[in-house]
Image (cartoon, rainbow, N blue to C red):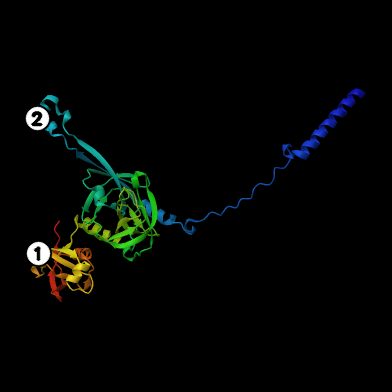
Amino acid sequence: MNKLWLIFAQSVTVLLAIFFVVSTLKPELLPWTPRGKLATIKESAPVEVASRPGSFNAAAEIAMPSVVNVFTSKEVRMPSHPLLDDPIFQRFFGERFESRPRRTSSLGSGVIVSPEGYILTNHHVVEAASEIQVALVDGRNAKARIIGSDPESDLAVLKIDLDNLPSITFGQSEQAKVGDIVLAIGNPFGVGQTVTMGIIGALGRSQVGINTFENFIQTDAAINPGNSGGALTDTSGNLIGINTAIYSRTGGSLGIGFAIPANAAKQIMEQIIESGSVTRGWLGVSMQDITPELAESFRLKKPGGALIAGVLKNGPADEAGIKPGDILLAVNGKSIADSSEMLNLVAALPPGKTVTLAILRNNSERSVKVKVGKRPT
């Protein structure tokens, strides 16, 4: 009995010694030892969308449902080798060597502008398309038909037949200022609907060489292939432009994009919906900008106006007595800076209206009344 008691006492002594060593040197090994306090992490309270500083989520959510993806397809007959069209060759080898049409597809964007299903996009997006499909953000798809297009402004109007369509609100593009923040919404490279942000870099950009009639909003919001026809909006989600083109040597965005102002696009759209085409004023003249060299030769105080380089015989200007070499200074009292501004100003005049032109001839300013004609297609 004494021997058993001795063994028990020694075992307890050894266990107590082990416990003392562990609790002193490695207390974390004991299961009941506290592991320390949990880290205190500060989390911000949920922020309402409208109150997020620096966020344009509200504007994007307003405009994005109105922007659609436009998918077009058309048949293209590839040129064949002359030998394949030889009757003798086809007699022996059959028609399998004949050139056959190949279907190509492309993509772009568009903007729903009315609950009736009218969509604004670019002319070059739907040009020569045999089939047009439109995809909405909510997952719906519809076949679209072309109501009309205007190649000179690169605008087209489509229509789809769906219910409960989200239409965008037109903003005041004429009140836009350089430095305003804008959002570009579209389907770049087919990756899906995308929103990019930038500012307005310039207004009234012309002589870019893209369209006949140019009065672009320039922006550095990233616009890439597939964005054409999409929306340029203000920070309230209102439409101020239709994205049209980029300046690029590589095909990607370099920070210079161009959009057609919404007020001009709206006027063209209304004419297309009403008549299927666009009617513009016309004088029947060819114009040239006044360079500093021309201003010096004409003894002008400063470059301005547009030099009339040619006059179409029996055209409105010819019948009014305007001659090559005249310098057009103003239309109905509104001075013009260059030939592009003159072209846009005259195009906005209704055919048949009589206007007063201020011209400079032989260093003498005079007024000439001209009956505006209809611009040929």
Q: Is residue 329 visible?
A: no
Q: Where is residue 355, by image quadrant?
A: bottom left
Residue tagged 2: 87
Residue 326: x and y in percent read 14, 70
Q: Quadrant of the N terminus?
A: top right
The amino acid beneath tag 2 is: Pro
Residue 117: x and y in percent read 29, 51
Mark 2: give few (<14), some (14-19) or many (20+) Cα within 10 Å: few
Mark 2, secondary structure of its residue: helix
Viewer-nearest of discs 1 and 2: 2
Residue 115: x and y in percent read 31, 54
Residue farthest along the left direction in this orientation? 314
Mark 1, secondary structure of its residue: loop
Query: Which is nearer the eye, 336 or 344?
Result: 336
Q: Where 141 sits versus 2, above or below?
A: below
Residue 237: x and y in percent read 38, 58
At 26% across and 50% down in the image, what residue appears?
A: 159
* Horizontal side of residue 51 vs 305, given as left or right: right
The amino acid beneath tag 1 is: Gly
Query: Which is nearer the eye, 91 or 329?
Result: 329
At 89% across and 24% down in the image, what residue appears?
A: 4
- Marks 1/2 in contact by CB < 8 Å: the verdict is no
At 13% across and 58% down in the image, what residue appears?
A: 376
Cα gap from disc 1 to disc 2, whole angstroms: 51 Å
Q: Which mark is residue 315?
A: 1
Q: Quadrant of the C terminus?
A: bottom left
* Horizontal side of residue 122 vs 20, given as left or right: left
Query: Which is nearer the eye, 222 or 4?
Result: 222
Q: Is residue 286 visible?
A: yes
Q: Earlier in the sequence, mark 1 or mark 2?
A: 2
Mark 1: give few (<14), some (14-19) or many (20+) Cα within 10 Å: some
At 35% across and 64% down in the image, what residue appears?
A: 178
